[in-house]
Amino acid sequence: MTGKELREKYINFFVSKGHKQVSGKSLIPENDPTVLFTTAGMHPLVPYLLGQEHPAGKRLVNYQKCIRTGDIDSVGDATHLTFFEMLGNWSLGDYFKEEALAWSYEFLTSKEWLGIDKKKLSVTVFEGEEETGVPPDTEAIEIWKKLGIPEERIYMLPREDNWWGPAGETGPCGPDSEMFIDVGKAACKADCKPGCSCGKYIEIWNDVFMQYNKQKDGTYEKMARPCVDTGMGLERTVAIMLGKKSVYDTEFFIPILKKIEQASGLVYGTNEDKDISMRIIADHVKASVFMIGDPNGIKPSNLGQGYILRRLIRRAIRHGRKLGVTGQFLSLPAGVVIEMYGGTYPELLEKKDFILKEIEIEEERFSSTLAKGEAEFEKMVPNILKGKERVIPGRLAFRLYDTFGFPIEITQELAAEHGLTVDTQGFDEAARKHQELSKMGADKVFKGGLADSGEITTKYHTATHLLHKALRMVLGDHVQQKGSNITSERLRFDFAHEQAMTPDEIKKVEDIVNRQIEANLPIAMELMSPAAAKEQGALAFFENKYEEEVKVYNIGDFSKEVCGGPHVERTGVVGKFKITKEQSSSAGVRRIRGELV
């Protein structure tokens, strides 16, 4: 079983069940500032889970590239990854638990599809929660029994095991039912069960039942139109099907690890500690390639997504040093990643030179920082080891960051290797005083969200379309949207343009936008094929494939653009638009911040 075969089998199975294949989306969410990255296949579909009609219908299936950084410290074990692909299918108010669980079971166990031994499957369901008033999922238990799973292999587990979402602070969420394969290891204890970290049970599938919408006040409101979100990790499933103990022992990583062997002179599989470092490098390089090569790609920086990217590259460099690599080497495994995935994600091939250049620049920039920071850290260690608390004070950790550019995460890793901890609270306090804690800045930038404040953010979303067209009128047709970020307080719009806008150009753009608002133009939506949208002159920068039908929004005769929405009905309700800042975002990309006043 290869990754390509599993993608095809999954898509074909759900197409046979009446699902339409839709395209995966960017790793960088355009209209959900509550998170930095697309963390799951359902993430781009949140508006449709909340009630919008999807152009492709109520049954959807796709594969989606994802980034998760919450488990970054676990990367290097048998299953955890920063970048991964998620196979997913959805019911948008159509079928629910009975069909979802039955089809999951059929795909996993039928000889026509994956053919997994039914006796090896165990399942988990949500046990319920008194404090939130969410009851146990007895409905799922009864369905599993009907399908033939014996009661002793059905486990009721708490929220941390069997609840999904929301992706941000608010939004659709609900109980889930997960499927696990018993890989045959001896139980670590008498009550070992799915969810245990010993490795006896490996999760292979997850059906999320979107029954609730979490509100800002923390309460759970029942959704009028319950939905299903199903997920299967591509890498993990292939590893299970091949009987591999680790996702790193598959086609997804072997070619990358070979290049790391070449750079380090070591052989993978001969030393556990060195193997972990090699896995971390392979994972982080792959994630970095996809972040930079995304259609809405990013560059290393000290804020938001750029900070995470920088952290991954720098962590990979440090683990390279642990393997004895002294020179620059990350372009070797990065080049292999591009070759491996270029057929499925052609944007990586298109941006190959740019990706490799950005990684090389960051590697060169950090090499001297790493050497100086590690030397300074080693000077601190003897005195700290003499103390009883064995804690690196926050002020010293911040000094490493402030003076040597040494990330707090790397200080924590080095500390752990010496049996020490870091006073992170003291670090945060020192950083606040100097106003240099970039992650805190990122948290402030990424508050709110399209799903949180529908009316206000819908106005801002409509304003971005007016702004996009106005920029093209003033600056030229080379202007293309490179990303947007909308909160209930402002919009941020990134676009392709080489030089800073002049004050006159900024005023012209503002005036054009405000004239369209004052004209109270009607906004209408049509469904059509991507080809028809192009023929009609709709503004769209298409990725490698699109749904069979797309939404095209017409703002009077002013603007025609492909978009998932939502929009106001007439421009007059938007309010007056003002550009508050115009600045560089990255090479060849400018950034505008605007407000409605």
Image (cartoon, rainbow, N blue to C red):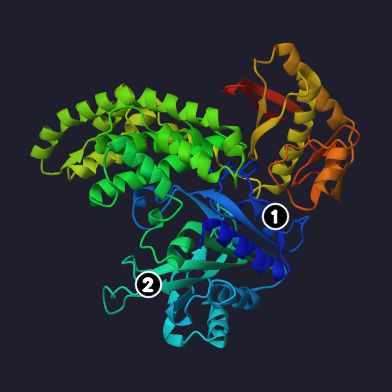
Q: Which quadrant is home to the C terminus?
A: top right
Residue ID at (24%, 35%): 324
Residues marked 1 and 2 touching at CB (< 8 Å): no
Residue ID at (56%, 45%): 34
Residue 81 in sight in this render:
yes
Seen from the viewer's position, the closer of residues 522 and 544 is 544
Where is 88 relative to 596, above or below?
Answer: below
Task: Name the quadrant containing residue 194.
Answer: bottom left
Which mark lies nearer to you, 1 or 2? Answer: 2
* Residue 397 as seen in the image, left or right of residue 386: right
In the rendered picture of this protein, how many numbered marks are placed on residues? 2
- Element carrying mark 1: loop
Q: Earlier in the sequence, mark 1 or mark 2?
A: 1
Query: Percent position (x, y) of residue 170?
Result: 58, 54
Residue 426 in sight in this render:
no
How would you rate the neighbour count of disc 2 (Cα within 10 Å): few for under 14, some for 14-19, many for 20 or more?
some
- Element carrying mark 2: loop
How would you rate the neighbour count of disc 1 (Cα within 10 Å): few for under 14, some for 14-19, many for 20 or more?
many
The residue under label 1 is which amino acid type?
A: Val
* Mark 1, residue position: 22
The residue under label 2 is which amino acid type?
A: Val
Where is 162 relative to 496, above or below?
Answer: below
Residue ID at (60%, 61%): 88
Query: Percent position (x, y) of residue 574?
Result: 79, 36
Seen from the viewer's position, the closer of residues 222 and 559 is 559
* Residue 88 as seen in the image, left or right of residue 429: right
Where is 421 relative to 141, above or below?
Answer: above
* Mark 2, residue position: 183
Residue ID at (66%, 65%): 12
Query: Percent position (x, y) of residue 284?
Result: 41, 42
